[in-house]
Image (cartoon, grey):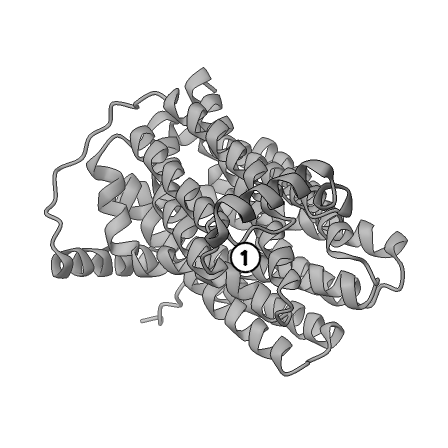
Amino acid sequence: MSPRFHLLIAAQAVSALADNALLIVTIALLEARGLPGWWAPLLKFAFTLSYVFLAPLIGPLADAMPKARLMSLMNAVKMMGVLMLIAGLHPFAAFAMVGFGAAAYAPAKYGLVTEIVGPRQLVAANGWIEVSVICAALLGTMFGGFLVADMVRSSNASLVLQAWLTATLPASAATTLTLSILGILVVYVLSGLLNLGVPDSGARYPASRIHAVELVRDFDRSNRMLWRDRDGGLSLAVTTIFWGAGATLQFVVLRWAADVMQLSLEYAAYLQAAVAIGVIAGAAVAGKYVSLDQAKRVLPAGVVLGLLMPAVASASSLAVAVPLLVLAGAVGGVLVVPLNALLQHRGHVLLSAGRSIAVQGFNENLSILVMLAAYAALIAVDVPIVPLMWSFGLMIAAAIALLMRLESTRRRPIAVPEG
């Protein structure tokens, strides 16, 4: 891989690290305000809205300007969201702003990968990018856990900052978490500096008019085209299920750790590292050993992933649960990296880099919205976490098994009557 590819990996990883740390810190902010637990998944819901509702726009936007420049601009938008939290605005509004930045950042990031990496290296490139994203999630979650620890919140620096902001800017709603939020802002600044160094790929696309109706029609055509493509539709279905389940699993593990293992938010955040370590290992293996033309052979991993959820839910100790979480992450990494590469390849062939990633983001994030809304509703009516995890896992396994069945039916030769 070229040095410019690795610089791209570093820039997006640091930005993703800040995203994950911000989620943990904002969950702690909700808890400090005494809000019920079902509000936490709604933070991710607010973050994801832009991915869905702005999908027709962000694809053409990513193709209309150099993608490296767009990444820098959207990182600045994320910083605005953090400043909104410090200013005392509602966490949902702040997360919606950060989500807008992330939504436009994503097609620029993945589109730039397809522009600077050839098809032969695309699975390996996806292995790199997924490993970096999961490493960012791992380190970001752990960083967030550190930032919400009593050691940081009750430190002299935190208390002095809170007192100073309260005296000089009463509207800022300063809390013991203000220093933590400022720490995340520093990480976004670092990401911005790295983004400035990401070079332009030189790829340019035909100009398209920014007309709302035409954009929606164009997006609808692109969406239908990718779903109707045999390989594109299959890989899109799997990644849509995977990312919706993964986003929900993030909150499920936090809730399970609190309810079953009696862990605080700080240590529950650390427990998520087990899943991230597994995904890193699985993604690395897939990136090295699975080629693009073999991508569909990893589908059984999706069934195994679903069946591991009831096993985790039934674990009675961390000594049993942690290895199962690592295994679940590894299976997920093996599943998503080849199919994500196949999806990007088919999208790049059928559409364009920006448009294909926007279509992918729309479907995957619509899945996240639906699953998070369902999860929040179930938590709001006090459904116990263990049976919820059983149901969740079995539905994932059944959905992937159905896709495998449909794919095998497509491959089956059609019988021709004799005579």
11 or 397, which lies in front? 11
Q: Is residue 348 left or right of residue 204?
A: right
Q: Which residue is mark 1?
A: 242
For the C terminus, which image quadrant?
bottom left
Return the x and y of residue 206 as percentages of the image width and height: 13, 37
Relative to 139, say whether 328 is above or below. below
Left-right relation of 161 to 11: right
Determine the secondary structure under disc 1: helix
Asked if residue 218 lies left or right of residue 383, the reply is: left
Residue drawn at (65%, 61%), measured in percent from left and top? 32
Note whether residue 171 is visible.
yes
- Residue at x 56% of width, y 57% of height: 247
Kind of residue at badge 1: Phe
Q: Is residue 407 visible?
A: no
Q: Residue furthest bottom?
A: 381
Across and down, in percent, residue 143 comes to 66, 40
**Image position, residue 200 (x, y; %):** 30, 23
Q: What residue do we see at 47% from left, 59% from top? A: 240
Q: Is residue 281 above or below residue 383?
A: above
Question: Front-most of 153 and 310?
Answer: 153
Q: Is residue 397 left or right of residue 54?
A: right
Residue 129, x across and y down, in percent: 51, 35
What residue is drawn where x is 61% and y is 79%? 380
Work out whether residue 260 or residue 246 is closer to the camera in this orientation and state it.
260
Number of marks: 1
* Viewer-closest of 127 and 33: 33
The local crowd at label 1, few if under 14, some if 14 to 19, many if 20 or more residues have their Cα within 10 Å, is: many
Q: Quadrant of residue 55?
A: bottom left
Outermost residue toward the top? 3
